[in-house]
Amino acid sequence: MKTTTICQGCWEQMHVPIAIRGPFSILYKAIGIRKSRMHPNLCTVCESMFTKVKKHKQIATPVTILFADIRGYTDLSQSAETSKLNELLHTFYDQCSLAVWEKDGIVNKFIGDAVLAIFNFPLNRKDHVRNAVEAAIDLQKNCHDLKDSIGLGENKSFGVGIGIHTGECYIGEVGTAYKDFTAIGSVVNLASRLQSAAGPGEILLTSEVFRSVSNDFPGSENRMLSLKGFEHQVSSYVLG
Ligand SMILES: [Zn+2]
């Protein structure tokens, strides 16, 4: 991934050049603006000021949400050493971040051993659905290699489960006492539920996501899911 001198998000959204690298970045750092932890080519203004600039606390926007987490981590945590587990978790976070950033998504949060990534905000990309699917494939590949390297290649109950859904979400600051920049709405909930239903090594897509990539993945299988909080079964696709 190429790093940029100015914040890509502020430039694309507002045409404001905010230096995040190079000599001018010192001026911005002095007033508290620095690189975002969610993407190396974004700045902290992207996290807090978009909503102020757009005059709303949250804005409704079409995005693709990807949740990934480590299956079998709890079992492993009972047998493996803490230092080895920490290392594993760090490597997983790194691999997630690299795969997501490469496709212009942001890593919004790490929740325990799970990751929430958002595509199409603040970097608007026409192909955000496909980008998320490609990031998931890269992520699975990297984690598969990681499994091999730590001698867990044969362990079938250990691996990464991924869920992806797309649609309109509310993005912005949630909460007043503790402000948190994130995405909320039913699209986020379904993506999260899908991820819980994904087995180790699987990528589960909703029909809305599958529609955009179906031609390239003829080996995908339909799977009906009974999900917590959903009255009817949800149609999903196991990417293959
Ligand atoms: Zn920015």
Image: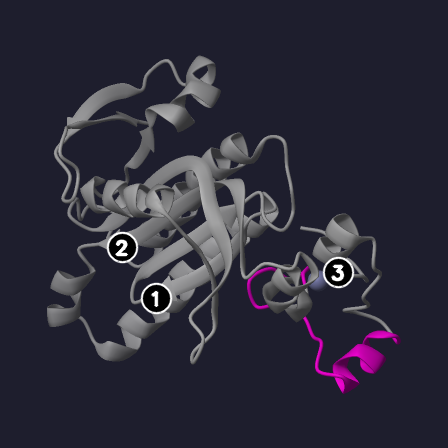
Where does the C terminus fall, quadrant-wise?
Answer: top left
71 displayed left or right of 129:
left
Q: Residues within 10 Å of mark 2 (few under 14, many from 20)?
A: many
Determine whether the beta carbon of the residue marked 1 sits less than 8 angstroms from the nearest atom of ligand 1. no
Magenta region, residue range = 23-42
In the picture of the structure, the residue carrying the numbered disc 2 is: 70
Determine whether the beta carbon of the residue marked 2 sits less than 8 angstroms from the nearest atom of ligand 1. no
Please say if 104 is above or below 239: below
Q: State the CA–CA distance, disc 3 to disc 1.
A: 28 Å
Q: State the CA–CA distance, disc 2 to disc 1.
A: 9 Å
Task: Please report the residue visible at 73 percent of the width from the left and 50 percent of the height from the top.
Answer: 13
Between residue 125 and residue 133, name the one nearer to us. 125
119 displayed left or right of 91:
right
3 vs 1, front mark: 3
Is 32 magenta? The answer is yes
Please say if 100 is above or below 213: below
3 vs 2, front mark: 3
Three-letter amino acid code of the residue under disc 1: Leu
Task: Please report the residue visible at 33 percent of the width from the left and 29 percent of the height from the top.
Answer: 206
The quadrant in which residue 238 appears is top left
Q: State the CA–CA distance, disc 3 to disc 2.
A: 31 Å
Name the main secondary structure of what is drawn in magenta.
loop
Tell me the SS state at disc 2: strand
Q: Considering only order in the chain, which callout, 1 or 2, is on the residue closer to the N terminus?
A: 2
Residue 191 shows up from this direction: yes
In the picture of the structure, the residue carrying the numbered disc 1 is: 89
Q: Residues within 10 Å of mark 1 (few under 14, many from 20)?
A: some
Q: What is the residue that sits farthest to the bottom in this orientation?
A: 30
Determine whether the beta carbon of the residue marked 3 sits less than 8 angstroms from the nearest atom of ligand 1. yes
